[in-house]
Each structure stands twice: as structure tokens, then as C-alpha cells.
Amino acid sequence: MNYIGMDIHKQFTVAVVKDEQGNKLAEDKFDNSEDNFSRFLQIYQPQETKIVIESSSVWEYIYEILDSMSYEVKLANPVRTRAIAEARIKTDSVDASTLADLLRANLVAESYIPPKDVRRLREIMRERKTFVKQTTQLKNRIHAMLTRRGVKLPTATLCNSTMIWLRDKFSGDNVFLHYLNLLEYHEKELMPIDKSISELSVNNKDAKLLMTIPGIGPTRSLDIVAEIGEINRFPSADKLCSYAGLVPSIHQSGSTLRFGKLIKQSSKSLKYNLVEASWNIVRTKESNLLQEFYKKLAKKKGKQKAICATARKLCCVVYAMLRNQKEFMVV
């Protein structure tokens, strides 16, 4: 069996090949392209070769190249691969060699590799988040410029009629008009993305299930599904809660056990969606168990702790719904 560690960068890759005894068989540096990977791997048969790459901004398309050649590829978690992070001598060659040794010893701290359809779904959802964030920043910028000019809007929001009013009022202000044009462009580009997401949510059975929860619509349900990926990769609801960052950190020394703030290493997007969905649920007119749980806990612990606890309970509900393929039950 051949073990290949690849230290991948945006433009190039350094690869080290080792045998089962840890002897270095080859080392090479080449530009990232399908032809170069194919040329380097041509003497190593897929059934006799294992490859490890480190999670980075360019791992996905390199993984797809290697996967199309039928190689077994593992994705190393850089945070947990401490052997590389703590190395005194750190070069691309050393990193690749260390990865190969970890793979040979079966000690690679793996990151989850979602199926291709999930990866594409995540890409769409993250693209939408980028447009929404930029749109919000532009609106804030416009409001700030209006405040400096002492201008009050005729409406509370920047609706179509207000945009027309602003264009007429600031017809000679090219800088202000530039921001209005940018805002209209972002809102226009966001429309086909939202339409695509709406169509995907209707055809996604997991998203349709989650939409039976009060306060969860097409976009949020699809975002939760994209971040979770395959529900069967989580052996229990507690594991999913941990992945979502809805469990406290634990500090133990001897017989002393203390619980701290919520863990930071988590899926921030999943955590955000579950917390926001929880706020919607507790505010809905239709009574449900999650709402009752929040109200009871808020009196004792306060709203912030209560909503985090409700988000964790919601996470458990989502796990059960996706695992058992059952709709939300309103009691």
C-alpha cells in the first residue's frame, strides 16, 4: 500500500509518497491541474494507494479530481492535525511527509466530505448569504449618508417608492446615486437566487419536513439541511448539538467539573439558523411544546439562556425528524 500526503496550496501542491514501513518513495511539486495530478499518480494504482489532503480553500476541486480517478481520499482537519501545527521545522515538504505518516498510522483527524449535491447546495446558500450581507451593508451606508445630510425618509424602509423619491431628491449627487445603483443591482441579483432556493426546498424531502416546524421557511430549512449534510453521520442528537455549538464547554481537573460558555468550534451557520428559528417559534401565536419550554425557562434563567436551551431542544427535534422522516407535531 502506498500512502500519499499532499500539502495543497492555491497554485501548487507538494506531494510525498511513502510505503507501509515509512520509507519515502517519491516527492514532487507541481502546479494544480488535472493533467499534473494524473501524471504524478500514473504509477500508483487506486486500489493500492491512499491519499490525504488538508482542508483549505481549494480542497474541493482537488478532491473532485482525485475522486474522479477512483482514489481513496481523506480530508484532514487542520485544527486537529496538531502534529503539523506544532512542528518546529515547518515546510511544505515536511507537512506533506507528516500527513503521509499520519495516514500510514491511521491517525488522520478527518473532516466530513459532503456528497456532491450537498456541496452544491452549500455553495448556493452561502452565495445568498454573501448577497444579503452586502445588501444590508449598502442599506446601512445609505441610511448613514442620509443622517449626515439631515434627510428623513418618507417611509421606514427603502421600498420602490422611496428609492424613486431618493433618486429625484439626489439627482445631482453622483456618489449617492452610485450606492442606490449598487443596492438595486444586489436586490435584482438576489431574486433569481431566492427563486432557485424556493424551487430546491420544494423538491428536497428533508427541507419539506423541516418546514412543518412553525417559523421555519424554505430558505432556513434548506440552509439547515445543507449544513447538516447526511443526518446518519451523527450517531445521536447530542452529537448534532455539539456540531451546532449548542453544548457548553467543559473544564475538568481532578474531582472538579465546571461548565463554561457554548463551544466555539462548531457550524456557526447551523447554530445561527437554529437560534433564529427558535425566536420565531417562541413568538408564534400557535402554542407548542418548545414555546412552553422557553417561557418556563425564561422566568428562571433569563431570555438569552432560555433561547439557547430552546435552540438545543429544537436541534434534538430536527435530528429526530430527519432520522425518522416524521413531521413536526404541534401539541
Image: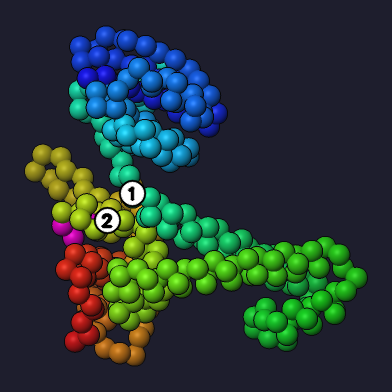
Vertical order, 256 against 9 (above or below): below
Vertical order, 261 against 308 (above or below): above
Marks 2/1 in contact by CB < 8 Å: the verdict is: yes
Image: magenta residue range: 236-240
Does 145 lie within the magenta span? no
The residue wearing badge 2 is 230
Query: Would residue 178 appear left or right of 78 to someone viewing this image?
Result: right
What's the residue at 48%, 59% (across, down)?
Answer: 124
Query: Would residue 149 appear left or right of 118 to someone viewing this image?
Result: right
Query: Would residue 183 appear left or right of 44 to someone viewing this image?
Result: right
Question: Is disc 2 surrounded by few (<14), some (14 to 19) or many (20+) residues within 10 Å?
Answer: some
Q: Amino acid at mark 2?
A: Glu
Can residue 84 be seen here? The reply is yes
Please identify the dominant SS of the magenta region: helix
Q: Nearer the viewer, residue 309 or 207?
A: 207
Q: Nearer the viewer, residue 73 or 253?
A: 73
Does 237 lie within the magenta span? yes
What's the residue at 19%, 64% (across, down)?
Answer: 323
Can residue 144 be seen here? The reply is no
Question: Is disc 1 surrounded by few (<14), some (14 to 19) or many (20+) residues within 10 Å?
Answer: some
What's the residue at 24%, 23% (across, down)?
Answer: 48
Q: Quadrant of the C terminus?
A: bottom left
* x and y percentages locating residue 5 in the rendered image: 34, 23
Q: Nearer the viewer, residue 211 or 196?
A: 196
Give the tally of numbered discs.
Answer: 2
The residue wearing badge 1 is 114
